[in-house]
Amino acid sequence: MDLIDRLARRDDAQLNTRTEPIPVTPDAPHAVVIGAGFGGLAAAIRLGARGYRVTVVDKLDQPGGRARVFEQNGFTFDAGPTVVTAPFLFEELWGLAGRDVADDVDFVPVSPFYRIRFDDGTSFDYTGDPEAMKREIARFSPEDVEGYERFFDKSSDIFRIGFEELAHVPFSSPKDMAKIIPAMMRLESYRTVYGLVSKYVKHPKIRKVLSFHPLLVGGNPFNVTSIYTLIAFLERKWGVHYAMGGTGAIVRGLAGLIDDLGGTMRLGEEVREILLDETGKRPRATGVRLASGETIDADLVVSNADVAWTYRYLVPERARTTWTNRRLERSRYSMSLFVWYFGTRRQYPDVAHHTILLGPRYKGLLEDIFENKVLADDFSLYLHRPTATDPSMAPAGKDCFYVLSPVPHLDSGVNWREQTEPYRRAVSQYLSDSILPDLEENLEASITLTPQGFLDDYLSFKGAAFSIEPVLTQSAYFRPHNESEDVDHLYFVGAGTHPGAGMPGVLSSARVLDTIVPDAADVPAKQRVTANVAG
């Protein structure tokens, strides 16, 4: 099936979305999903709705993966993703399970999308209102207003190809890639995000405002393909939303759908090996082995674990000819993150829901993070204040925050056991000097997550926060495929496979399974697992 056929099939599926799931029978084929992040949860729902028996296994004691929840002293902290930009993808998952997302999750719009604060104290309110955006740009650079409009037209064109047509289809062969090269050339995908923005606007602050988005998915705006400028149009098209009760409310709702579909969640259990049948021409995944030694047989395995970790540590090297240890080591990985979750005994009502605080350097800081692997003295920060929208995340009269700082992954050699507290204090001082006065004196809760934590908690290769870096040579066909190149019946969802990181990307990766995994009814009975199946 070529790419055009896949697109047509996908569009037909969208027009005929099932409103009732296929009943799961005791002899239905069994799927094991490794990892209960957004990608794994979405994959489990899609497979369950298509008649598979599904078992989800995760090493953490709660679902969500990077979207798990921390609680301390009455404060509730979403550990990971906080920006919801394509709520229809959640609506679709609930619809596949015969449910309405509004019954479980209340999405509310956030405005401004982001308040961007420059190091000199000036700020820019980034919204989905075209006229308001032009007024904001005119405050800094009237001559860039027309260029902004042309940039947004370009973002719209890139969105229609990059997201609406290609985000939900697999790139399994060179032919798939060849078919899109003319469109990529026309859309100038060979440019970087910052390069494309700079073609249209000249003011350095406006260039930063329009180019920071790749950092939300693990990419350096000076390195990643300009296809990621589609995020600007995606945000305007669907808005930026927040789930009342936090991202954890979405996770709980997704877990509930899996339960409704008859799936099984096994939490606090780590997968140590993907079992293979190596008697044929190609190895075939037949289940998993847990850290306890227990084996779970399966007709197919879907890994939402970090893709590099999966290949490097869960699949024997003898079974890999494409993703060898050498290739995995030489691939480029995203930056990591230092994340500090904190609660305050006072409120800061002037602070927006989402604030981006840009430090004194932009390109130089990103070079230190991505290229030099140096932990710099300066930083740029993303600050999340959910209590601006949802007071329930903190005790009455108090505020809940998390702040993240992009930092190099573990190839930097930084000893985070020694650096965590000094770095936290530096971040705290910067926030206190800028928008959160007397912060340290008002702390009531404090939790940190470092690149070492990304490795230890999430088994993220090199402690990278977003897996494979989304540069052009590691995108689409050149990214680890949704259907393993090396092992039959092994599939991937999540940040490290196509289309990439971010909530829309991860959810779309699960959507690809609708094209490459047959319906349960189409798996011949004689090929189905009949023994040692969980659930």
Image (cartoon, rainbow, N blue to C red):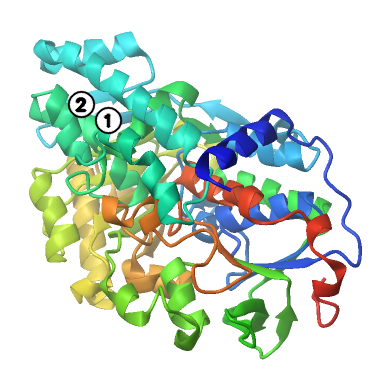
236 above or below 12?
Answer: above
Crowding at mark 1 (Cα within 10 Å: few <14, some 14-19, many 20+): few
Disc 1 residue type? Arg
The residue labelled by disc 2 is 123
48 above or below 449?
Answer: above
Residue 334 rendering spot, x and y as whole percentages: 30, 59
Name the front one of labels 1 and 2. 1
Residue situated in front as seen by the camera: 86 or 515? 515
Residue 66 rendering spot, x and y as whole percentages: 49, 58
Q: Residue at x 38, y 62 (%)?
A: 467
Residue 35 rendering spot, x and y as whole percentages: 58, 65
* Element type at mark 1: helix
Residue situated in front as seen by the camera: 491 or 134? 491
Q: Is residue 400 left or right of residue 351?
A: right
Disc 2 residue type? Ser
123 above or below 367?
Answer: above
The residue labelled by disc 1 is 186
Answer whether residue 372 is visible to the viewer in this image. yes
Looking at marks 1 and 2 on the same chain, the residue that comes earlier in the sequence is marked by 2
Q: Residue at x 14, y 61 (%)?
A: 371
The quadrant in which the C terminus is found is bottom right
* Element type at mark 2: strand
Residue 477 rendering spot, x and y as whole percentages: 40, 54
Q: Residue at x 32, y 57 (%)?
A: 474
Count of picture labels: 2
Residue situated in front as seen by the camera: 149 or 517? 517
Rounded to the nearest angstrom, the CA distance separating label 1 from label 2 is: 34 Å
376 above or below 535?
Answer: above
Residue situated in front as seen by the camera: 477 or 159? 477
Q: Is residue 392 left or right of residue 399?
A: right
